[in-house]
Image (tube, helix red, strand yellow):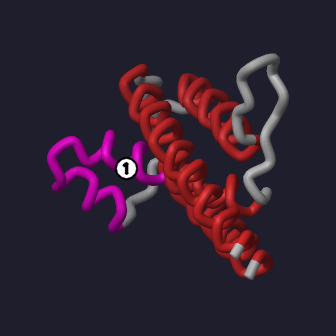
Amino acid sequence: MQKIIILITLLFVLFIARIIFLADTGAESIFFDLVKATPYGDKVGHFCLFGLLTLLLNWATRFRQLGCYRWRPYLGSMLVVVFVVLEELSQGFFPTRTLDITDLLADAVGITVFSIISFWLQRIQQRSRAC
């Protein structure tokens, strides 16, 4: 099962990389048309894409946590945070992109919500192993 989760995670990372590449180059895409046609589509997209990436990475890393004093964030969540911040900041270098703090906020909310879902999923897996 773990290998399937890792494969799905890798495929999703490639999907996100493709979307970022298309956006950086100003290319057209059905995804961009869908985002434009949906109210708050850009923010919903950021929330869902990076939230789901958070969940998948947390699951793929077997919910490994980092030790930061009393705070123990998931490794996958922290990797997504670093990636999102770097990706958003890089938008300042592309004429086809706009650096937008509200995109970063939507990313942060998605990462937080899906980190909580990761916590619940981890507990469910732990209970099922205990039985």
Do we see residue 19 in this rendering?
Answer: yes
> What residue is rendered at 31% in x and 46% in y?
44
Q: Position of residue 11 (x, y in %)?
A: 66, 71
Residue 66 is left or right of residue 56, and the answer is: right
Residue 46 vertical placement versus 38 (above, below): above
Residue 77 vertical placement versus 15 (above, below): above
> Residue at the front extreme?
131
- Which residue matches tag 1? 45
Image quarter of the N terminus:
bottom right
Place residue 7 in its image quadrant.
bottom right
Do we see residue 21 in this rendering?
Answer: no
Residue 16 magenta-highlighted: no
Q: Position of residue 106 (x, y in %)?
A: 39, 34
Q: Position of residue 67 (x, y in %)?
A: 84, 28
Place residue 109 in its image quadrant.
top left
Q: Position of residue 25 (x, y in %)?
A: 53, 48
> What residue is rendered at 26% in x and 61% in y?
34
Residue 8 vertical placement versus 88 (above, below): below
Q: Identify the main secondary structure in magenta.
A: helix
Image quarter of the C terminus:
bottom right
Badge 1 element: helix
Looking at the rendered structure, the kind of residue marked 1 is Gly
Stretch in magenta = 30-49
Residue 105 is left or right of residue 130, and the answer is: left
> What residue is rendered at 75% in x and 19% in y?
70
> What residue is rendered at 55% in x and 30% in y?
88
Residue 72 is left or right of residue 41, and the answer is: right
